[in-house]
């Protein structure tokens, strides 16, 4: 209706509907896909369906095509933005696409961040309330909250190499594009794509992401302690939001002054963390994933390795194994060894034999994983 011209001067009547759509939204027409998605942002009924449809279409071609679309969206948004505070917010196509892509892609990363925080809460008794006007406030709450904040930051740092390569590539590209126009906001991409609208939301409401809150171990009043813990998670989320946005403490949240000794140092740590999350996956991180798998859960161990490849690469590795012979792999062991070896060759990591051996030790529990 807007006069789009199909490649090769083909008309829709000369093609099937499916072929016409494939031609119209081909990877060489990223501008068409972007305009389609941008135009759908005002209509809540079709917005999500439009995003799912385009991403599904591009997923057939490969994860790299989805990455190109997100990068194109970032470039367009930065180019057309005059107010840097609005980047990747509101009607942002790039942020909407990342919300869709994150689903299922970041499960391991999210568990690595949130599980240690929830586990920490099970061994603590008492309130975390920092507002002096609250009846639950006590001086001991300050140290209790600082300990929880410190554990949260540590878990974020430790989970870095489980952040999928796709997301880190997007954040690296956003940093590069934004820093050219708004040098003071170089990390706005990773702040919005990962920390604010993903990690902080999951900390505040872990149940919404399928993360179960464990019961307190030592509390005399379990119901009350659960309430204290939920309040604690909300406060932790707020603290990290303010640290990420570099916001000063205002009168409405004077409670943050009591933890200012920790937040002052944490600002530097958060800056370093955001920079790390905005770097492409390094060779040393890939080798770390092979050398130190979590063999207590072999399914997770294999998945952690596969996470370092994008979907297209994993698919290619598995298909390559099937094509090596006319028959399927003789056993689950062969499939495991072949998969790890294929990925290791792709990544030029010389540790696949050790990793395959570790997985083999727990092979029985993997039978159900491969059906």
Image (cartoon, rainbow, N blue to C red):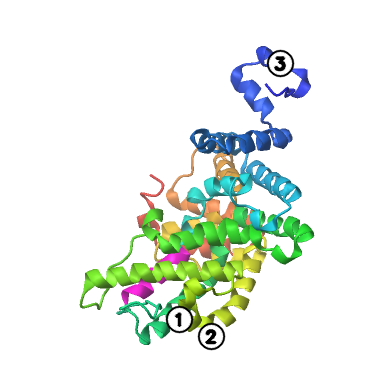
CA distance separating discs 2 and 3? 66 Å
Determine whether the residue tagged by mark 2 lies in a helix, strand or loop: helix
Q: Earlier in the sequence, mark 2 or mark 3?
A: 3
Is there a contact, CB below 8 Å, between mark 2 and mark 1?
Answer: yes
Judging depth in this view, the residue of 350 and 93 nearest the camera is: 93
Identify the residue shown where x is 62% and y is 37%. 37
Tag 1's secondary structure?
helix
Q: Residue furthest left?
A: 220
Task: Identify the main secondary structure in magenta.
Answer: helix
> Mark 2 vs mark 1: which is more N-terminal?
1
Secondary element type, mark 3: loop
- Residue 278 among those drawn in magenta: no
Q: Which mark is residue 255?
A: none
Which numbered tag is attached to residue 11? 3
Label 1 sits on residue = 146
Labels 1 and 3: the sequence-earlier one: 3
For disc 2, the marked residue is 261
* Displayed quadrant of residue 122: bottom left
Q: Position of residue 356 (x, y in %)?
A: 50, 60
Distance (Cα) linking label 1 and label 3? 64 Å
Magenta stretch: give its range.
112-123
Give the image location of residue 179, x and y in percent: 75, 61
Q: Residue at x 49, y 53 (%)?
A: 336
Quadrant (top left/top right/bottom left/bottom right) for the N terminus: top right
Q: Is residue 231 left or right of residue 16?
A: left
């Amino acid at each position: 209706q807007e006069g789009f011209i199909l490649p090769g001067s083909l008309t829709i009547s000369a093609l099937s509907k499916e072929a016409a759509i494939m031609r119209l939204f081909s990877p060489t027409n990223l501008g068409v896909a972007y305009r389609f998605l941008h135009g759908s942002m005002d209509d809540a009924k079709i917005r999500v369906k439009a995003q799912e449809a385009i991403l599904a279409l591009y997923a057939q071609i490969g994860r790299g095509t989805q990455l190109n679309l997100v990068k194109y969206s970032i470039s367009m948004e930065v180019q057309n933005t005059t107010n840097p505070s609005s980047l990747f917010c509101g009607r942002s196509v790039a942020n909407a696409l990342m919300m869709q892509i994150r689903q299922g892609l970041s499960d391991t990363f999210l568990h690595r961040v949130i599980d240690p925080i929830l586990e920490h809460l099970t061994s603590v008794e008492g309130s975390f309330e920092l507002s002096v006007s609250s009846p639950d406030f006590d001086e001991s709450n300050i140290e209790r909250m600082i300990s929880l904040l410190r554990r949260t930051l540590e878990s974020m740092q430790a989970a870095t190499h489980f952040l999928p390569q796709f997301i880190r590539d997007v954040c690296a590209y956003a940093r590069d594009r934004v820093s050219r126009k708004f040098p003071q906001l170089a990390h706005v991409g990773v702040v919005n794509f990962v920390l604010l609208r993903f990690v902080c939301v999951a900390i505040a409401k872990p149940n919404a992401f399928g993360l179960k809150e464990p019961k307190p171990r030592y509390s005399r009043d379990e119901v009350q302690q659960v309430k204290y813990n939920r309040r604690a998670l909300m406060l932790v989320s707020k603290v990290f939001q303010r640290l990420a946005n570099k916001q000063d403490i205002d009168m409405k949240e004077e409670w943050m002054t009591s933890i200012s000794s920790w937040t002052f140092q944490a600002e530097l740590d958060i800056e370093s963390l955001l920079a790390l999350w905005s770097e492409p996956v390094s060779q040393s991180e890939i080798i770390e994933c092979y050398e130190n798998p979590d063999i207590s859960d072999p399914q997770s161990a294999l998945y952690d390795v596969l996470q370092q490849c994008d979907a297209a690469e994993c698919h290619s590795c598995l298909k390559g194994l099937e094509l090596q012979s006319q028959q399927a792999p003789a056993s689950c062991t062969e499939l495991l060894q072949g998969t790890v070896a294929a990925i290791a060759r792709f990544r030029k990591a010389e540790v696949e034999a050790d990793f395959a051996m570790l997985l083999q030790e727990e092979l029985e529990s993997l039978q159900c994983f491969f059906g």
